[in-house]
Amino acid sequence: MRGRNLLVMSAVIVVAIALVIAFGLSGIFRGEADQTPAISTTPSLITTTAPAAITTRELPSGTINGAGASFLNPQMQAWAMKFYELTNGKIQVNYQSIGSGAGQAKFREGMLDFAGSDVPLKKGIYNEFKEKGGIIQFPVIIGSVAIVYNIPGAESGRLRLTGEILAKIYLGEITYWDDPAIKELNPDIALPHERIIAVHRSDGSGTTFVLTAYLSKVSEKWKEKVGADFTVQWPVDEIGSGVGAKGNEGVAAAVKQNQYSIGYVEAAYAYELGLNVAEIRNSDGRYVLPTSETMKAAAGALMARLPKADEDWSGIFPHEVMDPPGPDSYPITSFSFVILRQVYDDPVKVELLREFFKWVLTAGQESENIVKGYIPLPPEVAEIGLRGLEMLRAGG
Amino acid sequence: MNTDKAFRLSLFFFTISSFIIVASIVVSLIATSYPIFMRDGLSFIIRGAWNPVREDYGILPALLGTLITSAIAIAIALPLSISLAVFSSELIPGKFKIIMNNISDLMASLPSVIYGLWGLFVLAPILHQFVMMPLHTHLGFIPLFSTRPVPTNLFTAGVLLAIMIVPFASSVIREAYSAIPYYLKEAAYSLGMNRWEVIRMMLGYIKSAIFAGTFLALGRAMGETVAVAMVVGNIMRFPKSLFDMGYTISSLIASQFPNAEVYEFMVPALYGGAFMLFIMGLAINLIGFSMMRRMVVHR
Amino acid sequence: MSFRKIKERIMLGLIAILALLSAVPIFAIIFSVYFEGMKHVSLSFLIDLPPPPIGDKAGGIGPALAGSLILIALALAIGGTIGFFTGLFLSEFSHTKLAQQTQMILQIMVEFPTIIVGLFAYTVLVLPLKRFNALAGAFALAIVIIPYIALNVKEAYKSISFTLKEAAFSLGLSAPTAYLRVLLGAAKSGVLTALLIGMAKAAGETAPLLFTILGSTFTYFAGLDQPIHAIPLLIYNFALSPYERWHQVAWGASAVLLTIILTIFLVSRMIIRGART
């Protein structure tokens, strides 16, 4: 029997050592992180932005795990970091950028406390959750897709395009820059007889979803042939003029490297990465760039059509809200969403989520908490989320 | 003797756990990919499509990507690893030999994510500027170089893989080389052969080891994920040239699996791809091992 | 000079050039990683939370480093135990059919695409638990390192001289005592090297972690059933992100990872050399 005991003992010891190391380390690291003022904050910020609720009331502590849209990532990290500081490290919001589609997929499997997404929950998933206690989804920031291009000699803001032309380019029907349709809109640019290289995302992406929804709205043929989704099969690839790239940065890099190319990225990146942005014709016939004004105008025009947080948004979003009315509206404007369940097993989780997103939709929308290039919500749109948060509850 | 029996039993238990793991992996691959094979049959493997809107998947372009990147890797790595093996066992004195072998072993143990990071930020721009663009500009009429390259593409992935697999191939060759009986070499020299002729003869003698090393390295190259995903370009279409961007099976899984559960058939499709990768890897490794065994017999 | 002579010169020269060429990348990589990475590495870099992508906060890789150490320890505990006893079996019962088949299986496992192991861990440990978790990552890493440890432990026990084995058993020691006390002493350096090889693998593997641990921004360790971060995953995510600040952190993290790998490598070489003399 001694042998067996020895064996069991050695196994136990190995496991025990591993656990001690694991827990010991975590203790050490936690301790150090708490003591070191590693995340230094200027005191003025705290006093100006901390809502009274956060500083006076006893807060729950813990981690909430979310993942999804990469566009949302810089802003979510900024919010999470600020909130971490405001709560003295008690509430830790862990957001990983894995893409909108991935966010929805993992949320569907119940692996995330919340998902970030550039489009609302897909209909099928929404219906699944409706039977399991329901969904809360609401916009947290305005986003829009900028059309970017690289034509030597044509600087930013010079090129004018319409949705139909854009659809035809990605359908592979307009293949040269000196196509009569493009020439007609741009009499002052010397458009060369060069093939249009159409850059698109290769990974599943909310940006692609928004763009393809826009193309579906303005082009019947696009709607029939391609449709709108996180990943689509690009007709332009089949004629050999398409280039796929991973992430907004990949698209930006591909557009920069390839002369005579066109691509699409989130507007915030387009400016951050210094790309040439095209003017797009809106439904009033005016040519507009994605700017803070035109995006806000579009969001304002959408306001009346927005559903409540517990309703299914997929019917109108993003397809129906594309190309909104108004002389100043930028046609490819959308929102980034946060998606929650209505019911969580853990009451603490409910409180953490409510505290964080309440802050995001109020103080979080103030300009000092908004990352450069992002556009805060109009208060009326933020209200959708605040109403929605009231539906959060704990239950088995 | 009860103790010994218990001990043996537990040894047995630990030993079969590897079988259990491998068997469960195979079962999970088959069970999860089953729906796509049932729905599409072989057309899933022999077509190109990645259209989640229509739930239409065909992985041939990614299979080709895997084969092309591995072929580039082997074409570059083979002369390098043979040279490295010969150089360290034949041409340099003992002390340097150890250093050389250590360098080679260190290369084998570097994490692939570090290769990937370096490949993405250092190797890809260099290759783009000094290799791919000149080849495309001057030899663009050859179909292999016909695509105007961006830095991350199949060729870059192949070169990076070559760098990563050299140590594996060369250590197999090195071991076989050093196991050649000494009298053979002596005999060859006494026949009046010069050093190169002796080396050539010895390489002929360990031909099967060279094949084995190549096949094992090929297996590595086909399965490598992270480093490839960082430099291959990640686009689903039939590659038109070496400079085209593409997918490999493993990089397809890495970049598409996270959002797969949104769709009905994407998870089975990706597991189907993983299953194909497993089958291909298994076949190549079995060939490699049988070569290696033949080499032992040969000796 | 004869044609043969010229040919010999050329071929030997070519071999030398190609051999040296194949060693260039490793130096280039080590140089780039330290050159780009060390600028950002400091004590606080090892402890602090990762910085937001936009802005110029210093930040660090604290959660990833802590997570990596935990994952390595767990993977070694699981994979090391299975690998060690499998290796022992392989060396002592090498004549059995089971041993030969195990050897084959292990060799296949060495060549297994690690992304498939990641998928497997996702299926058996993430889906059922409905949460990304540290255990799934450690389990996947353990599967990856089992064959390396088993095959090396086998060599270690095989290298023990027959007379020592005879002596141990003729003393009437029970099998566990003989193998785990007496003979382990003789195989010590080999077994230790095996564990170190497994450790280096566990430290550097990324693909098994892609679908299993999610990653974390603020939390160093919250439990085995919770998400955790790891250095390779951080490098992968940050390198592929569009932010310059995160690229810098990825380089810094690579320098840390490379240092860990180099240390393990040097220690294992020292052990081997110590055993030889």
Image (cartoon, helix red, strand yellow):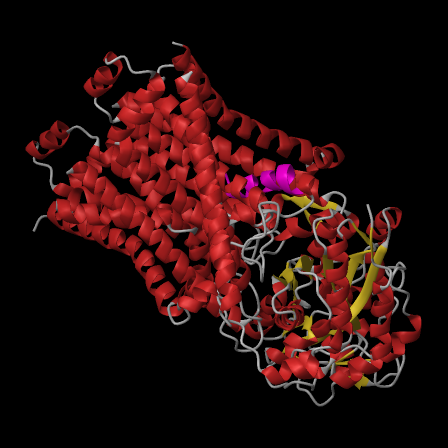
Q: Height in image: A297 above or below B188?
A: below
Q: Nearer the viewer, residue A286 or A302?
A: A302
Q: Is B184 inside the magenta-drawn segment?
A: no
Residue at the farthest bottom position: A188
Side (left or right) of B289 relative to A351: left
Point out residue A1 in the picture as x, y percentages from the top left corner: 42, 16
Q: Please name the predominant secondary structure of the magenta segment in the image.
A: helix
> What's drawn in magenta, residue-wise?
C112-126
Q: In the shown orientation, is residue A272 left or right of residue B242?
A: right
Q: Quadrant of residue A288 in the image?
A: bottom right
Q: Which residue is at 75% across, 73% downward?
A: A53
The residue at 7%/51% (across/down) is: C1
Q: Is residue C103 visible?
A: no
Given residues A190 and C217, the one toward you in this image is C217
User: Could you tell me which quadrant the C terminus of chain C lies in?
Assistant: top left
Q: Which quadrant of the structure image shows residue A294?
A: bottom right
Q: Is residue C28 above or below residue A288?
A: above
The residue depicted at 37 percent of the width and 31 percent of the height is C151
* Residue plotted at (72% across, 75% down): A364
Of residues C157 and A212, the one nearer the viewer is C157
Q: Is residue C117 magenta?
A: yes
Q: Closer to the camera, A118 or B144?
A: A118
Q: Position of A369 compared to B216: left or right?
A: right
Residue B58 spot, x, y in % from top left: 68, 44
Q: Position of residue C236 (x, y in %)?
A: 52, 58
Q: Position of residue B103 (x, y in %)?
A: 27, 50
Residue extending farthest to the top is B1
One can see residue A315 in this view: yes
